[in-house]
Amino acid sequence: MPVPEHLEFFIDPNRCIGCQACVQACAECDTHRGYSMIQLDYIARSESPQTVPIVCMHCESPTCAEVCPADAVKRTEDGVVQSARKPRCIACNNCVLACPFGVPKMETPMELMMKCDMCYDRTSVGKKPMCASVCPSQALFYGARDQIERQRPRSRPIHRFLFGRQIIVTKVHLMVPFESPVAPMDVIAAFRETVIGHVFGPNFSAETMVGGGK
């Protein structure tokens, strides 16, 4: 069965509390063999405990699949990009290096790329992904668009991202402040924005992070 069209996946980083519930729940998904396909990244670990959940964005034109020489990475008709298929995966790491969101992970002991597949065994039958079902702050939300619009009146979902000259369109949506520009989010430009009193740019370094630079 395909994933129901009216149900969508939304990420709201501002709501993440770093509880790791999503990481633990993901490992319990029946198809993951005990491996978690989600991770929490720190925004600026030396300055803040703020975390953000990293899941596969399920691109309309997945770079991971496009660079796979063995045709091991497949995208379903309903837009979910699957983990590499074991019989085909040659553990070349092309997908790991190519993903603009840094999602695919090579499980070296298994010689297999594994990543978030939106709990396809659950979502394809109308259930929530494991991570969204346990997130206490609803930083990970799976449901109808009108539902999240009612719950987050000061935010809006985006699914178009600009990497240099390339626009990436994704199945998963990122919640941003309502007043944010409608144009695709310029991911590269974000590195030059001021974050917790520091500016990320060409001269960014660990020294800058701890306040030693300007």
Image (cartoon, rainbow, N blue to C red):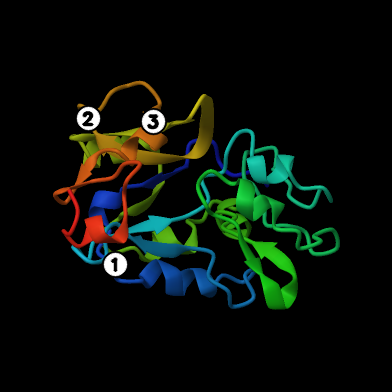
**Residue at the spot 76% in from the left edge and 59% down from the top edge:** 92
Q: Position of residue 106 (x, y in %)?
A: 65, 65
Q: Describe the element under mark 1 as helix, strand or loop.
A: loop
**Residue at the spot 73% in from the left edge and 47% down from the top edge:** 74
Q: Position of residue 25 (x, y in %)?
A: 46, 71
Total residue callouts: 3
Q: Describe the element under mark 3 as helix, strand or loop.
A: strand
Give the residue number, with chain letter if any, for mark 1: 18
Q: Where is residue 78 in the image (x, y as percent from the top left)?
A: 64, 38
Classify 10 Å Cα crowding around label 3: few (below 14), some (14-19), many (20 and above): some
Task: Name the residue type under label 3.
Answer: Asp
Classify 10 Å Cα crowding around label 1: few (below 14), some (14-19), many (20 and above): some
Give the number of the disc on residue 178. 2
**Residue at the spot 25% in from the left edge and 38% down from the top edge:** 193
Say left or right for 163 vs 40.
Answer: right
Q: Quadrant of residue 18?
A: bottom left
In this rendering, is residue 153 above or below 20?
A: above
Say left or right for 114 vs 188.
Answer: right
Q: Where is residue 184 in the image (x, y as percent from the top left)?
A: 40, 26
Q: Describe the element under mark 2 as helix, strand or loop.
A: loop
